[in-house]
Image (cartoon, rainbow, N blue to C red):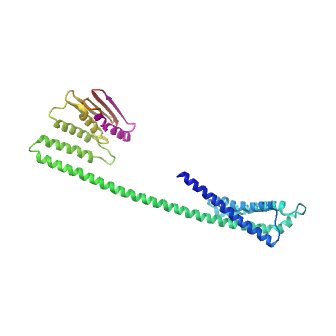
Amino acid sequence: MALQSKMNFSRLDVRLILKHILGWGLFIAYEVSFIRFTVGAFSPLQNYICYYGLNIVLFYFNAHVLLSFTIKSKKSYLLIPVMILLEMLAYLFFKYILDYFLAFPPDAIPSQIVYIKKLLVPNIYRGLYLLVFSTLYWSVLRVISFRKRVHETETVQLITLKEKAELERNLAEAMNAYLQQQINPHLLFNTLTFIHNTYYKYSRKASQCVLLLVEIMRFTIDDVNFNGKTSLDKEIEQIQNFIELNQLRFDYKLYIDFHAEGDFEAHQIIPLILLTLTENIFKHGNLKKDKAKLHISVNEQHELNFVSWNLKKHQSEAKRLRSIGIKNIIKRLEYSYKHKYSLNIKDEEDSYGLELRMQL
């Protein structure tokens, strides 16, 4: 794309240069032909090259250098007339040099007084003539450039409006999806609550499982503050609910040493970090034999310490690889607590240990 744009730009430059050459060629041919038919004589080729070279330099210097730079000044209304006057004097000086060497034979060079009377006024007229057309040329370029900038600005505005409309549409779709996702869980909550209330008389154990599940699910959806964090004591509460729920799920006793200590109400944490780590204990751990360990504490330096240890269940390697909970936790910790946490994992053949330290 960039190469194609560069090629198009080069083609445009060549075409523009050819147009200028053609324009100057027609202008010079017209003047030379007019002088030939009125005066009846041609000047030497080097005279045309020097005189028209000076005229062309004046034309482009005035348009592309003098006017283009002085117009940017805050006092351009004063600077432009002064610079044009100096430019005109420079043109007359170089014109005098050319006339001195080219317009007269070496043995017939006129005095300065004669030169002034004979050629000064025509030279001034010639210089003003070129400056007027150069200024008109510069003005046309300014108008074209202004219209191009206006077009580009309008194009950018249209693109911005289009992108804004797409963002608003995407936001509306996301909001609808979010509201729908809110409706679906709350419908599930209401249904689970109904099941709990209905079957509480017949199986308090099953009803208690349903109630604990509702509390955990409600926490995962609702209990998040504007900063994306939740109260640490609520996360600890759901860990307790999760442990109780798993105790009720099985006919045998689960051995786990759970201990929580610290001022959890005074701290916040991104949700589901500790709950996911706790879930891994029950998902991959063997809690029938030795006690699994789960200790959570917060010290006075606002540092959270989460320590867990458990024996491993017998699982296939493929099933172990399917677990992405730890990877997701590390990504979330990197995003929210970069350089403020440490996660040490001791994955042995028969046991699994983990220690998470976080500065809250």
Q: Nearer the viewer, residue 221 or 29?
A: 29
Number of numbered discs visible in the structure rendering:
0
Q: In this view, does 305 lie above or below 166?
A: above
| Residue 214 position within the rendered picture, expressed as x and y whole percent measured from the top left | 20, 45
Q: Is residue 209 above or below residue 308?
A: below
| Residue 313 position within the rendered picture, expressed as x and y whole percent measured from the top left | 24, 30
Q: Residue at (24%, 38%) from the top-left corner?
A: 239
Does residue 122 show up magenta in the picture? Answer: no
Image-quadrant location for residue 23:
bottom right
Q: Which contiguous range is marked in magenta?
A: 318-347
| Residue 195 position within the rendered picture, expressed as x and y whole percent measured from the top left | 14, 47
Q: Which of 110 and 234 is in front in this view?
A: 110
State the quadrant of the C terminus.
top left
Image-quadrant location for residue 309:
top left
Residue 178 visible at all: yes
The residue sitting at the right extreme is 107
Q: Nearer the viewer, residue 28 or 248?
A: 28
Q: Residue at (79%, 70%) from the top-left corner?
A: 35
Asked if residue 102 lies left or right of residue 264, the reply is right
Image-quadrant location for residue 333:
top left
Asked if residue 231 lies left or right of residue 70, the reply is left
Q: Which of 51 and 359 is in front in this view?
A: 51
The residue sitting at the bottom extreme is 38
| Residue 306 position within the rendered picture, expressed as x and y whole percent measured from the top left | 29, 33
Does residue 332 show up magenta in the picture? Answer: yes
Q: In this view, does 185 lie above or below 204?
A: below
Asked if residue 156 lies left or right of residue 275, the reply is right
Residue 260 visible at all: no
Q: Residue at (17%, 35%) from the top-left corner?
A: 247
